[in-house]
Image: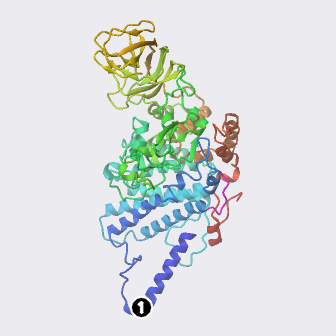
Amino acid sequence: MNMKRICILACIVIAGLTSCKKFLDTQPTDFYTTTNYYSTETQLQQALNGVYGDLMRPELYAQVMGFNFVSTTDEVMSNRTADGDARGLRYNYDASLVHIASIWRYAYVGINNLNTLLDNIDKPTMDASRRNIIKGQALFLRGFLYFILTSNYGDVPVVLHTPAINDVNIPQVKQADVYAQIEKDMKEAEVLLKDYTVTQAKFNDVVTLTAVQAMLARVYLYWAGYPQNNTAKYQDVITYTDKVILSGLHALNPDYRQVFINLATDQYDVRENIWELGSLGAAAGVVNKSGNDIGNFVGIQSALTALDSTSYNSAGWVWVTKKLFDAYETDPNSAVMPNKPSLDIRRDWNCANYIYSGTNPRTKAARPNPWQMCAGKFRREYVPQAIRNTNGVGGTYNINWPMIRYSDVLLMRAEAENYVNGPTNAYNYVNQVRKRGYGLMNGNVVKSITMVNSGDGYTKVPAVTITGGGGNGATGTAIITSGKVTGIYLNSPGALTLGSYYTTPPVVVIGTFWTPGASYTTGTQITNGGILYTVTTAGTATNTPPVNTSGASDASVTGAVFTYAGTAATATATITTGNESDLTPGLSKDAFQLAIRDERMRELCFEAVRKADLIRWGSFVSDMQNFASWATANGAGVTSTGNPNGLQGVRNVSARHVMLPKPTYELNLNRLLTQNEGW
């Protein structure tokens, strides 16, 4: 392995330098070795920090792990051609691709550094509880890196100590045995970190007790699925998700969107995000790390320009799928076309229906076709101005990566419960996630706005104001077709904080009402007495309201002239009833499992778990083949409105893509490695 070559070379250099100086009988002072390092608590912590920092390398979670090999599924597809193939996006890669080697190489570099740390963990004199925290985190991270390796490459070598100079060829271990080692490391870490929680750490970009338990639940979930199919592990999923749930340390953020805004604005949400990987600019956690590509390739397209202080840089190299867009429930009573408003807040956050184009000026352009909507979950527009850099070139970004969230724990709990005991007691967990998705965690929100009268004569889009009902924060946009207000697109169902929910339907006002004494400019449209007027002469209105004269100028005001334009539009609002988001009751075990699969896509899209989910369900290849047929029939191949490049990537999927190939470079170094089937 490459990491062993690094170690071997280092040992050779050190041996050469010290052998010619034996007569001095001194320790080196101008460079570090295992002999003169790891001698203090500070040095142990620095070594651990280095591994945390390396997790946010471009070769791991700063780019590759969240983008390269997970960006063509049924929820998201690359829009690239040649670039997509060079980065592994369209399943045209082989074992020699540099990004194939990156995951392997840097996972083992991390493991080697952790092994060296663990080999020297007892060296310094220090507080035992502090030593346990460092050792527990190191053991967990080693298990986690092996989890990355085995879930991507299958059977891999397991190295638990710093390799000796002659350890060149190390055999790979069966995946079941790799899982057993991961379990051993993480369970030992759980014991060592038993008193180290997010309450004590105050940050979630370090490993705490519930991070270990949540990730161990994910390990068991993968172990239970394909290719191991060790279904006894579902009971372990229940055990470990219950530990997280019953700890009382974690909860859903009432606003799904805020979870990702917090990641962009350096706000730690230790209750929702059980473990996240920190990046540049984050609050003072373990270590300040470099910037990353989160929100770039998988983000809303925009160019960075010094002429626009709100600008940011994002390539937007993937688009969502119509399957994902259609998976979110819409308002059946809405007349808005072509895309009805969704009752699920997650849709319009995850499926961004706009891009930014140009640089001088930068303009916002609509993207109404789902096949060409950007992945909107990680939004760089929320990144602090000082970090994203507006000098017209480059740009540095700080968004943290959400490694595992509380909603995932709830969905894992529901899936495992359904497998072991059936769906009866599993509903509670999935419905918590759905209630948050619909904005109903703490009360009712605006559900729908229905047109009572579409009016006529509108030449401009009127403002929509939603007030009363005991709540606030609901907003909408009028849709104008041939001078009529044909619908109201509900942009937000309301503010999702305690005290801002609705108890009765609010009042919807379309347009601006006539105000006595106000000044009006030419072209302004106002409403009075159910009539729409257009200001044809600028001026100030008197206290006498305009009178409908069926098209003639109204002379009852001084200065401003109001001309009849048509009938004013009106609409009414309805609010939710608190349980409308709940999953359909009475589902069979199989139907509930299918519902969980869709819910995981709606909740966790673009968080690099969909492909792994499809693989562990044993349906990756067949699902991609079926999706390719569905996507073709539903417009994905149309150049002007679809995503033919992404569709081709889906069509390229075959059985060999269940696992990544072992890197060619590593096979040449370690003769005991065996290439995965199909490569």
User: What residue is drawn where x is 40% and y is 26%?
Assistant: 474
Q: Residue furthest bottom?
A: 23
Colouring: rainbow
User: What residue is drawn where x is 42% and y is 11%?
Assistant: 531
Instruction: Name the residue type under label 1.
Output: Lys
Q: Residue furthest top?
A: 549
Q: Is residue 138 above or below residue 81?
A: below
What x and y, as percent, mark residue 388? 40, 51
- Specify start and end residues of the magenta stretch as a single range: 90-97
Is residue 231 visible in the rendered structure shown here?
A: no
Q: Is residue 130 magenta?
A: no
Q: Is residue 19 above or below residue 568?
A: below
Q: Main secondary structure of the magenta part?
A: loop
Binning the other alpha carbons within 10 Å of mark 1 as few (below 14), some (14 to 19) or many (20 upward) gives few
Task: Classify mark 1: helix, strand or loop.
Answer: helix
What x and y, as percent, mark residue 470? 33, 21
Q: Is residue 91 magenta?
A: yes
Identify the residue position indicated by label 1 in the image: 22
Quarter the N terminus occupies: bottom right
**Left or right, 590 with reference to 32:** right
User: What residue is drawn where x is 34% and y is 27%?
Assistant: 500
The image quadrant that residue 46 belongs to is bottom left
Is residue 122 visible in the rendered structure shown here?
A: yes
Quarter the C terminus occupies: bottom right
**Left or right, 68 with reference to 238:** right
Tell which of 539 and 417 is nearer to you: 539
User: What residue is drawn where x is 46% and y is 68%?
Assistant: 113
**Left or right, 581 with reference to 78:** left
Tell which of 548 and 128 is nearer to you: 548
Tell which of 397 and 95 is nearer to you: 397
What x and y, as percent, mark residue 325? 57, 34
